[in-house]
Amino acid sequence: MNALPTKRQLLRERARRSTLAFMRHFFPPREGMGFIEGPHHAVICRVLDEVLAGHRHRVIITLPPGYTKTEAAVVNFIARGFAINPAARFIHATFSDDLARENSEKVKSLIELEEFAALQPVTIKTDTKAKDRWKTDQGGGMLAKAAGGPITGFRAGYMDPARFTGALVIDDPLKPDDAFSPAKRAAVNKRATNTFRSRLAHERVPIVVIMQRLHSDDFVGHLLTGGTGEVWDHLDLPVLIEPGSEYPREWTHGRPIPHDLPAGPLWPAKQDAAEIEVIRADAYTFASQYMQRPVSIAGALFDMGGINWYRDLPAVDYYRMYADTAQKTGQRNDYSVFQLWAKLQNGGAALVDQVRGKWEAPELETTAAAFWGKHKGKVVRGLAVEDKVSGTGLIQSLRRKGVPIEPIQRDRDKYTRGLDAAPWIATGQVYLPAEAAFTEALRYELQTFDGLGTGFDDQVDPLMDAIADMLGGYGYSLDGIF
């Protein structure tokens, strides 16, 4: 009579057949703790299983930072690939050599575990010392390099189309800090056609790209809009699953993979609805890295190419403050914003400083007074506030404190005000700080502003006031009032 398999043998067999079971099985001996699983892990691992089974050959997975994408799609995917075929050959590329070597070492350490040997004996050649390039005694191996560096003398996979022989795995090929550099984006994107594909042993060797979105023209954007001419199976996982959201029409070379995840937070144990609401404050980062929907640099109403992004403020004539106060302070309501602008000696106008938040009336007054006090050493010609709802009360309270404050009557709708401001932006008369803490959130608002109430526009409102006042706009001016 055959003995029944032990629990350990059953776990090993499951790990042999499933990437998710593989992660569950090998995470504890590697990390000394249990694997904390989210609903998205099963979806990602199912897609990776299909790659290993030869059913998918060009795959993109996009998801937020910190959601264990490297653990799943690099470390465990590659290690399980060696368990399936010890002669498999992998190339791994990411944004830096240091990170590539670290990921390579993790794969190597995993397949050297005793637990792994019980699943599939794979031995590393004893003459292999480099962390970024090593071979197995069974004829396989791995090369790990920065995405922008040389990848020579090694190919992913080999000439045996009937079985899985390896893959090219690209994980975050661009640093977030480099996302707004056209030259750095172009350099990485160019490698999709002139380097990466030439490193495949044959065209059916899989390419797996996994990353957080950073820019509309980042590596994934390049691929989804036809950068290589190939169609990519795309698993798109935003931090907040919204039912009924449509796959963007401009992603002409993407084929969405259904995930069937429930509406709401992608991984509630990591970030629940309240925590997601907090990260919305940085609107551009939220849209790109968390929701996987970076907006076009062209903007909805404003020509973003005309903005002067300064690091050193040009010579100043005088300063003035502008404010936009919210009607309510609930989580889904607008923010209140105070901005300091400079009228430049060259005729332009520059945003110098900003504070933004959701404050009730007493705290709103305190914040306004503190912002005024922060810049009292400058020649500030007063504070202009929209005379409406909470702004009316703020005007009265600050006047009692001796702050030179003047109400703004906005008698035009946002769209018309935007049309009036647009020429000044397009012709280079508006200067915005290139590296302020609020820069990316403001950039996103400007890019998506359509004047029709889409998304947040609390930072754009005082910006349009400043343009109208300092540059001429639609005829109202506060000169001579203060």
Image: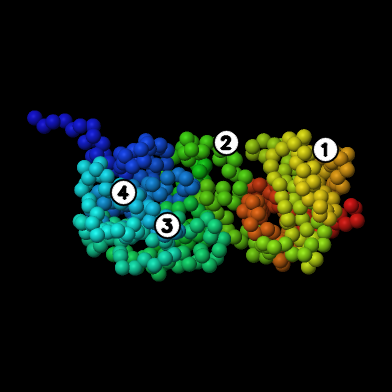
Query: Label 1 vs label 4: CA separation?
Result: 64 Å
Q: Quadrant of residue 387?
A: top right
Q: Sort mark 1 into few (<14), some (14-19) or many (20+) by Cα contacts within 10 Å.
A: some
Secondary structure category for the residue under label 3: helix
Left or right: residue 467 versus residue 113 is right
Question: Residue 311 at what x, y percent from top left?
Answer: 67, 62
User: In this figure, which residue is indicated by the disc labeled 2?
Assistant: 274
Judge whether 11 appears above or below 480 on screen: above
Q: Amino acid at mark 1?
A: Gly
Q: Residue furthest bottom?
A: 194
Q: Nearer the viewer, mark 1 or mark 3?
A: 3
User: In this figure, which residue is indicated by the disc labeled 1?
Assistant: 393
Tell me, yes or no, whether the two marked residues, 2 and 1, touch with CB atoms within 8 Å: no
Q: Amino acid at mark 4?
A: Ser
Query: Label 4 vs label 3: CA separation?
Result: 16 Å
The residue depicted at 24 percent of the width and 39 percent of the height is 12
The residue depicted at 53 percent of the width and 67 percent of the height is 183
Tell me, yes or no, whether the two marked residues, 4 and 3, touch with CB atoms within 8 Å: no
